[in-house]
Amino acid sequence: MLPALLALALAAPDPAPFDAIVRDAQRAWGVPGVVVAVVKADEVLYLQGHGSVGHGSPRPMTPQTLFPISSCTKAFTSTLLAQLVDDGKVAWDDPVRKHVAEFKLSDPLADREVRLHDLLCHRTGLAAHQYLWYRAPWSRAELIRRVGLVPLDKPFRSAFQYQNTMWVVAGQAAENAGGKPWETLLRDRLLTPLGLTRTSTHADGIPEAKLARGHRFGPDGLENVPLYLIDKPDPAVSVLSCGSDLARWLQFHLRGGTVDGHPLVKKATLEATRTPRITLPLEGLERELQPETVQMSYGLGWVLQDYRGRPLASHAGVLDGFRVHLTLAPRDGVGIAILANVERTRMHLALSNALLDHVLGVEKRDWNRTFLDAIARAEKAVTPSPPPLVGTKPRLPLDAYAGQYEHPAYGTVTVKTAGASLRLTYHRFTGPLEHVHLDTFRLREPDLDNPTLGFHLDGAGKVERLEMLGGFQVSFRRVAE
């Protein structure tokens, strides 16, 4: 027994180089806590938490600390659909309305031709329209109805445009074809067989003490982000998991869809989720951040690229204060999971590259410096916003801007006077309007990225609509009083 244990200990990878790589990344990017898993198909090379669950918290980060994995949920949904493909209940090329009869797109051609795989590779012609989905008050059925009222932003299948609501529709297709709720299918067909005992399809009922705490960088440095978790099942983003469970999830993919020698999905069907469907443009900063890559594309829940001549599949997940990143190097049999408690950072990419280089034994590169320098150059090249104009004032009295503004898909925006200023409310978001110039204001609401908005007047000089810019790019028409 003793010789066998000694041989096992000698064969185990030395954790010290992994520790050094992770700590270097933490220092370079100012991230208070991170969990890292590095695996091969049947071996965990490294699984460790570093730092604390939150800035100033005494609780250490561990491989069992839970994170919202956000858009890394998508690979769970596409794998579930792959199982239904094996069952003959769906096909990637099925018309969407074969499985979700109420789904519509506003463009007649797209509406007639849209297939399941179009939803999964973000090529329907709809841009993100994230605030139609993010923290929205309506049910899944109502969201699906409303997205059909939004005009396409690009011609059908002409461009990649990241779109979460389309994945909600895809999850509904899985639910209708599988005969059970998406969250039940996912639990019964993937989470339980894989032994992902800490992974959940949504946050309802999970104690905060088990969760990491999120952060973002503000004007004064690192800031705590109020905890926001998705408390209803959402096939695009709602899964929560941890480093130890994600290690098993990556191993499942590296083994071609088997667990304990038994296939949960056919290898070829699973690999179809990692087959390129649409090219991703590599331009500007993104080009600088991919110096070892010639081409990138998107499959069905995975970003696909070459890296130092090797195929790579990866995906990031971002939610208020958190960033998660999963990487598969299938030809080399390596998987990496990174869970960090800072939202707006590129540490996940730099750290994934550094860890992969170490495991593969290829020439090292200072990825932290490479990325930080590229970001600094990009920020320097950005034309700064003009300074606020001094001495300007709104063209109308403030109460002339107050009222309700509606959009058929997005719903209602309410503007009210609040003393000597205006305040805007949209669903769960609210904040003061700061005057910029004439009829232009800025909404102070960090969760909406502080968008600029403009009030447009009719020929009689009365406000007729409100144009929300930033992540919206939506015009709300004033409701007659």
Image (spheres, rainbow, N blue to C red):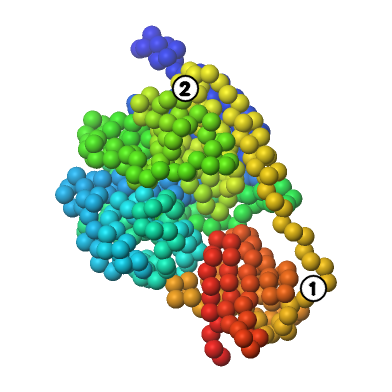
When the figure is inspected, residue 262 is found, relative to residue 393, above or below; the finding is above
Q: In this view, does 143 lie to the left or right of 364?
A: left
Quadrant where the N terminus sits is top left
Callout 2, which amino acid?
Answer: Val
The crowd level at tag 1 (other Cα within 10 Å; few <14, some 14-19, many 20+) is: few
Q: Is residue 24 left or right of residue 332?
A: right
| Percent x, y of residue 432 | 68, 71
Determine the residue positioned at 46% across, 50% down.
70
Task: Using the rendered view, name the quadrant where residue 448 is placed.
Answer: bottom right
Quadrant where the C terminus sits is bottom right
| Percent x, y of residue 480 | 54, 89
Residue at the front extreme of this rendering:
459
Q: How far apart are marks 1 and 2 (CA)?
A: 59 Å
Determine the residue positioned at 59% across, 29% down.
367
Determine the residue positioned at 59% across, 75% down.
466
When the figure is inspected, residue 8 is found, relative to residue 28, above or below; the finding is above
Q: Does the rendering let one see residue 226?
A: yes
Q: Is residue 377 left or right of residue 17?
A: right
Residue at the bottom extreme of this rendering:
481
The crowd level at tag 2 (other Cα within 10 Å; few <14, some 14-19, many 20+) is: some
Residue at the left extreme of this rendering:
88
Q: Which mark, residue 392?
A: 1
Secondary-structure class at tag 2: helix
Say which residue label 2 marks. Answer: 359
Callout 1, which amino acid?
Answer: Thr
Precedes in sequence: disc 1 or disc 2: 2
